[in-house]
Image: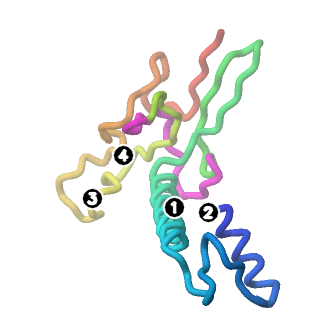
């Protein structure tokens, strides 16, 4: 639906509207049908989901990854990994999301308060988001290493 919305936005910006097609989305008098209202609601939900996904990606950016037959897998974090620029590097962790079959590698902030806590909160332990319940360390990878390698 969001792809269709992007297409529609492109045409609305670049072309003059000369009318509407009578049928599934518009009645004979040019009024929106219940089907169009339903589609618009789905687009709104999709935009909200994208916004939530963006916020999650700021908190837990994806790791950089590489695999080769000779060396196996490697995950690492940098200030730009996952296409997210930030002022911290982080450490690789498995993130388990509800409903997902497999975890994925994310970079996790290791200092300061958890993302859900205020900066001036006296209760945080200066561990960033390391204590988030959906995270798990990679076996065999030092807890604060920014790179984890898993040879074949």
Instruction: Name the residue located 47 percent from the left edge and 47 percent from the top edge.
Output: 60
To which residue does mark 2 refer? 2
Image quadrant containing the N terminus: bottom right
Tell me the distance, in whole angstroms, between the alpha carbons under discs 2 and 4: 31 Å
Dot label at residue 117: 3
Dot label at residue 46: 1
Sequence order check, earlier mark of 2 and 3: 2
Please state which of the two labelled residues, at mark 1 or mark 4, is closer to the viewer: 1
Q: How many marks?
A: 4
Left or right: 124 as drawn, with respect to 14: left
In what element is the residue under mark 1? helix
Check whether the beta carbons of the residues at disc 1 and disc 2 lie within 8 A of each other: yes
Check whether the beta carbons of the residues at disc 2 and disc 3 lie within 8 A of each other: no
Instruction: Name the residue located 66 percent from the left edge and 33 percent from the top edge.
Output: 65
Sequence order check, earlier mark of 3 and 4: 3
Tell me the distance, in whole angstroms, between the alpha carbons under discs 1 and 2: 7 Å
The foreground one among 1 and 140 is 1
């Amino acid at each position: 639906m969001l792809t269709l919305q992007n297409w529609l936005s492109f045409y609305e910006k670049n072309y003059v509207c000369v009318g509407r097609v009578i049928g599934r989305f518009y009645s004979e008098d040019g009024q929106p049908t219940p089907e169009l209202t339903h589609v618009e609601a789905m687009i709104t939900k999709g935009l909200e989901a994208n916004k939530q996904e963006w916020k999650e990606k700021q908190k837990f950016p994806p790791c950089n990854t590489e695999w080769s037959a000779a060396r196996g897998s490697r995950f690492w974090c940098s200030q730009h990994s996952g296409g997210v620029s930030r002022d911290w590097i982080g450490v690789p962790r498995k993130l388990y999301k509800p409903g997902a079959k497999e975890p994925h590698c994310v970079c996790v902030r290791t200092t300061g308060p958890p993302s859900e806590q205020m900066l001036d909160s006296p209760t945080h332990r200066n561990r960033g988001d390391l204590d988030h319940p959906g995270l798990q360390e990679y076996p065999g990878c030092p807890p604060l290493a920014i790179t984890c390698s898993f040879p074949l």
